[in-house]
Image (tube, grey):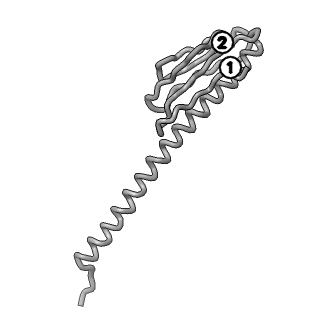
Amino acid sequence: MKKSFTLLEMLVVIGIIAILVSMGFASYSTVQKKTRDAKRKGDLSAMQKVLEQCYSINNFTYPAITGNGTTSVSTNCTALGGPSITFTDPTTKTYTVVGGAGATYSVSVTLEDTTVYTISNQQ
C-alpha cells in the first residue's frame, strides 16, 4: 500500500505558505520605508552640521543651498576652506529650501508616513 498526501492536505499547506509569504512582503515593505526615511533624516542632519560649520568660518553667514523643489540638495563652502555636501533622495521625494546665503535657512522633506521633517539654522 502506497502512502501519499490527500488533495485537502496539499491545499492546506499551500494556503499556509501563501499566508506566510504575504506577511513577509508586508513587513519587508514597511522596513524599506523606514530605511528610506532614516536615510533622509541622516542626510539632512549631516547637511545641518555642514551648514553650521560654514556659518562659523563665513563671517556668521550661511552659504547658499541649491535644490529647492528637486530630489537633490547641495551646499558648498569649500571656497572658504570648509566642507560641502550633496545628497539625492532615495526615491522621488522633493526637498523644500527656504533661505540660505544669509542669516537663516530651512530644508524640509515629506517622509513616507506623510510627516514633514525639517532642519533649520541653530544660530
Q: How many marks?
A: 2
Q: Residue at x 45, y 53 (%)?
A: 27
Dot 1 surroundings within 10 Å: few (below 14), some, or many (20 or more)? many
- Give residue 93's position: percent from left, percent from top: 46, 28
- Mark 2 packing: few (<14 Cα in 10 Å), some, or many (20+)? many
What residue do we see at 57% from left, 38% from top?
Answer: 38
Disc assigned to residue 63: 2
Coordinates of residue 82 in the picture (x, y in percent):
72, 15
Can you give x and y, in whole percent of width and height, for residue 87 in the image?
56, 25
Above or below, comparing residue 27 to residue 36 in the picture: below
State the separation of the CA atoms marked 1 and 2: 7 Å
In this rendering, position of residue 17 left or right of residue 63: left
Residue drawn at the location 51% of the way across and 23% of the way down: 95
Q: Earlier in the sequence, mark 1 or mark 2?
A: 1
Q: Among all residues in the image, which is located at the extreme bottom?
A: 1
Residue 13 vs 28, above or below: the answer is below
Q: Circle 1 sits in a helix, a strand or a loop, which is it?
A: helix
Q: Amino acid at mark 1?
A: Leu
Q: Position of residue 5 (x, y in %)?
A: 27, 79
Establish if 82 lies above or below 42. above
Determine whether label 1 and label 2 are within 8 Å by CB.
Answer: yes
Q: Is residue 109 left or right of residue 24?
A: right
> Which of the image's four quarters has the N terminus?
bottom left
Which corner quadrant of the image does residue 103 belong to?
Answer: top right
**Relative to the observer, which residue lies in front, 66 or 106?**
106
Q: Amino acid at mark 2?
A: Pro
Residue 5 numbered mark, or none? none
Where disc 2 sits, the SS reads loop
Q: Is residue 17 left or right of residue 8?
A: right
Check disc 1 and report the residue beneath it: 51
Q: In which quadrant of the rendered image does the C terminus lie?
A: top right
Figure check: 76 above or below 32: above
